[in-house]
Image (cartoon, helix red, strand yellow):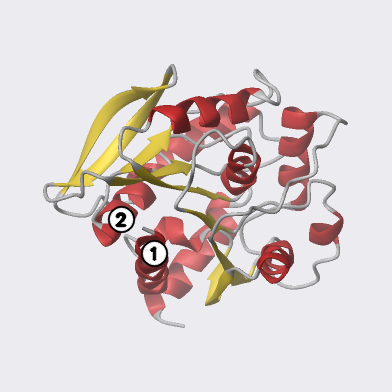
Amino acid sequence: MNPMMAGTRLVMKYGIRPVYGPPMPIGMQRTLGDLASALQRMPRGVTATSVVLGGRTAKRFAGSDAADDRAVLWLHGGAFITGSTKTHGSLAAHLAKATGVPVYLLDYRLAPEHQHPAAVDDAVGALKLVPEANVVLGGDSAGGCLALLAADRGVRDLAGLALVSPLVDLTHATARAYEGEEVLVRADWAEQGVRAMFGHDLPVVPDPTVPLVVHVAEHERLRAEGEALARRTGAELVCVPGGWHDIHLQAAIVPAAKRAVDQLAGSINDFF
């Protein structure tokens, strides 16, 4: 493991992990997450523009030579209770640069203020109005779950689905069985978020019927459910060696994360 990856791993474990989940108030989790996002640099040559999709604000990240007939709609992670265009802006920008297509990062409604199906409704509303003709829907962590639920609505023909460390098993049975190393996601944070969004009426997250790529990391609690989803659907599966949950977010500073984003971009472009 190179020094940058090792150092970032320590920051994740001892600086970021304690912030997310009980007993930290949700409002404080959001504030600290947005503040920490300042550590993530934007790539050169990518412009962020504020837009509105389906009544929700979003950021459109695109290079000067971005394609005008293809796009990605990305749903950020954050256990359904945190996350924003700030926390995931760097990821969206790096993905826009690597794919050469615009990436829309949606500011969907968060729990507990807005429970299911509010976030899915927001994603569906945005998906209808992405102006580019060909769209890949993507999401990381809880956003991956929302992407699967939104895709199942069938409101638009999708070129494909791209998921990073997706939360698929809302019962947490798979995650609880994990005995490996996890430097970022505490089980009680994921469970807090699912309760806040869905209460006790948990939907079954559907398997998609469109082309799918799934990325997971070697050392993460959600690895098994991402792998199981890929096996069931015959999807392309990538496991980032030595990585942690949602390592793609550190594409600006960790070489392995940047390689993973570039690889994900290649898969997305293959969908178009």
Which quarter of the figure has residue 221? Answer: bottom right
Residue 85 in sight = no
Q: Where is residue 172 in the image (x, y as percent from the top left)?
A: 82, 51
Q: In this view, does 113 lie to the left or right of 175?
A: left
Q: Nearer the viewer, residue 12 or 242?
A: 242
The residue where tag 2 is placed is: 94
Q: Do the residues labelled 2 and 1 touch (CB within 8 Å)?
A: yes
Q: In this view, does 51 lie to the left or right of 208?
A: left
Q: Which of 241 and 140 is in front in this view?
A: 140
Q: Nearer the viewer, residue 143 or 155?
A: 155
Q: Tell me the number on the disc at residue 261.
A: 1
Q: Is mark 2 on a helix, strand or loop?
A: helix
Q: Please state the total of marks drawn on the protein image.
A: 2
Name the residue located 40 percent from the left edge and 38 percent from the top edge.
105
Residue 55 in sight = yes
The residue type indicated by label 1 comes to Val
Q: Position of residue 165 (x, y in %)?
A: 59, 59
Q: What element carries label 1?
A: helix
Name the residue located 43 percent from the left edge and 73 percent from the top edge.
5
